[in-house]
Image: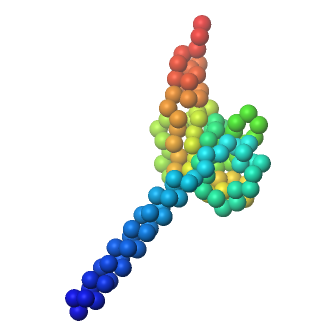
Amino acid sequence: MRRKNKLIISAVGIAVLLLVFGTATMSATTKFVSPTKLDSGDYGEEWVNLEGVAHDLQTDGETTRFTVTDQNASVEVVYDGTLPETMGEGRVVVAKGVVKDDHVVAKELSVRAHEGDNNSGQQNGRPPAE
């Protein structure tokens, strides 16, 4: 009986290690893409880090929809979860998630520190030049 228990414990341990390794590898191989690159490439069902400027924020309960833009293209992002405190119109964000058809379903959302226009009259975290 002891040998069987050791075998079961070993198998569970190996499964947990493989799960942790797979998750870590998936995060390490996730591509950073801009809306232009995502719009012009084939990223169907891939994990990506979509980086750009947030616009058109709409929150309905726990679900938030917004558009991430760059100079040339826009991509819709759907995010279920608590928004970062610094999230706002014009802020540079990174939406980490899966590409689904023409939008990204984000599992994690971060806002770049001091980038974008979130405060009235301030750009990049600094007051406007006079």
Quarter placement of the C terminus = top right
Residue for point 27% across, 83% down: 6
Give how far across and how far down residue 63 sits, in percent: 57, 53
Question: Is residue 79 in view?
Answer: no
Q: Is residue 97 left or right of residue 75?
A: left
The x, y position of residue 15, in whole percent, is 40, 74
Farthest residue in the top direction? 130
Q: Along the horizontal axis of the image, is 16 left or right of 32?
A: left
Q: Is residue 96 left or right of residue 21?
A: right
Against 116, residue 15 (above or below) is below
The residue under the point 65% across, 53% down is: 104
- Name the foreground residue: 2 vs 33: 2
- The image quadrant of residue 12 is bottom left
Q: Position of residue 94 (x, y in %)?
A: 57, 43
Q: Pick the quarter of the image with the N terminus.
A: bottom left
Q: Position of residue 37 (x, y in %)?
A: 72, 45
